[in-house]
Image (tube, grey):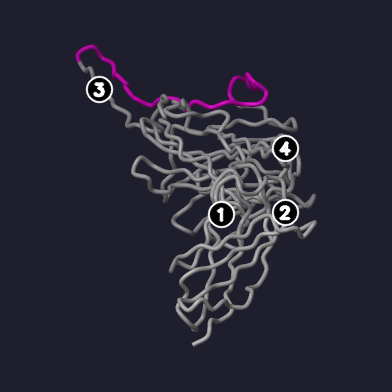
Amino acid sequence: MALTKPILNNVAAFDASNSQAFTFNVVGGSQVVGNTLTIKDNTTLSTVYTNTQTSFKLQHIVPAGTLSNGKYYQAYVTTVDAQGNVSVQSNTIQFNCYTQPTFQFTNVSENTVVNNASYEFQASYNQAEGEILNEYTFNLYDASGILVSTSGKQYNTLSVLPLSISHLFSGLADNSAYSIEVVGYTSGKTAITTGRVNFSVIYSSPRLYSQLYLTNNCKEGYITVETSIKPINGHSNPSPPIYIDNKKIDLREAGSFVEWDGGYSFESPYTIRIWGNGFNWNNNILRLKNSNGSTVVLSVCSDGTDFWAELNVLMQGWTYPYCIMSNKLQNVTSSSNLFIWLRADGDLYDLKLEEVE
């Protein structure tokens, strides 16, 4: 039985200072007992490596240091059987040799302590010959190594090196251990990783709600009111925030916001109530976002005659957002006091807008 033409598999870019396995397949034919791999400079077509290896494995190992980084090569293989017969030449493949890229975190190291429920992880990529990063994914794991959140596949459009990338993870649990990793592929299809870096989260996590306790001190003629309600730590722009009559916060200027990014959680069903006046119409006034990227955005809208609230919900895995509108009001002015009521129960939402005194 004659030898069949071998099929040489493509090779991703690799560091020539390391050994590299070239694999191939054969379909039918005689038993392969050896192979000869030939590598040429793709520009000059001069042979830089040719060697025969005896092995039943359908692979050929090129020793470390045989090739040079920064070069573009082509290769083909022939096989040999026990009788010394040699097959026809395989297909020819092309590949690059590049120095191993550096890929590492810049703001977190082993056993770092994060003091917040949200953290923007930053990493840096660089490569000596200028090979760019094609795609990357930030992955967050719990203490058991289970994937709890991911950035999803991100594509790089920049050619500048070194390259800085980042991703914000929210909803980190207090007194918990995690690990973070970035995996990616270079333009030469080389798989790279930062490796997993362990870190812990420790922060003050105030409770959102608590019961109200009343004690009737009948002999003294008074009632004691006790509660363990604690404030949720947040931040604002401007900081400190501007208050109106010490009752309302002024968010009318562009870029103004108040944000709470930790210390609480929403579990369906839930209700949100908002009071305000002087809204900047056709703008977002509330945004909820969790660690997996699901969002709930509340807007106030007007066409000059009618005034209404609008809700857009986009959960992880959804292709299209869920959108509902409240009832409409007329004759709304900047001094009109408005009340917005939002109710969520599973994937169902209800929205109402009222004018109050």
Q: Disc 3 or 1, which lies upstream in sequence?
A: 1
Q: Is residue 309 visible?
A: no
Residue beneath disc 4: 161
* Residue neighbourhood size for the residue with mark 3, other residues' Cα within 10 Å, grouped as few (<14), some (14–19), many (≥20): few
* Residue neighbourhood size for the residue with mark 2, other residues' Cα within 10 Å, grouped as few (<14), some (14–19), many (≥20): some
At mark 2, the secondary structure is strand
Residue beneath disc 3: 215
Range drawn in magenta: 219-247
Q: Residue at x 35, y 40 (%)?
A: 143
Q: Give me the C-alpha separation between circle 4 and circle 1.
A: 30 Å
* Residue neighbourhood size for the residue with mark 4, other residues' Cα within 10 Å, grouped as few (<14), some (14–19), many (≥20): some
- 37 or 43: nearer the eye? 37
Q: Amino acid at mark 2?
A: Tyr
Query: How far from the left and from the top, in percent, is residue 298?
Result: 61, 47
Q: Residue 62: which disc?
A: 1
Q: Is residue 60 visible?
A: yes
Q: Give me the C-alpha separation between circle 3 and circle 1.
A: 83 Å
Give above or below for 311 relative to 167.
Answer: below
Give above or below for 337 relative to 184.
Answer: above
Residue beneath disc 2: 72
Query: How far from the left and from the top, in percent, is residue 225?
Result: 32, 21
Q: Residue at x 48, y 52 (%)?
A: 344
Q: Amino acid at mark 4?
A: Leu
Nearer mark to the viewer, of 3 and 2: 2
Q: Give me the C-alpha separation between circle 3 and circle 4.
A: 67 Å
User: Is 330 left, or right, of 276 in this rendering?
Assistant: right
Q: Disc 4 or 1, which lies upstream in sequence?
A: 1
Mark 2 and 4 residues: CB-CB less than 8 Å, in contact? no
Q: Amino acid at mark 3?
A: Thr
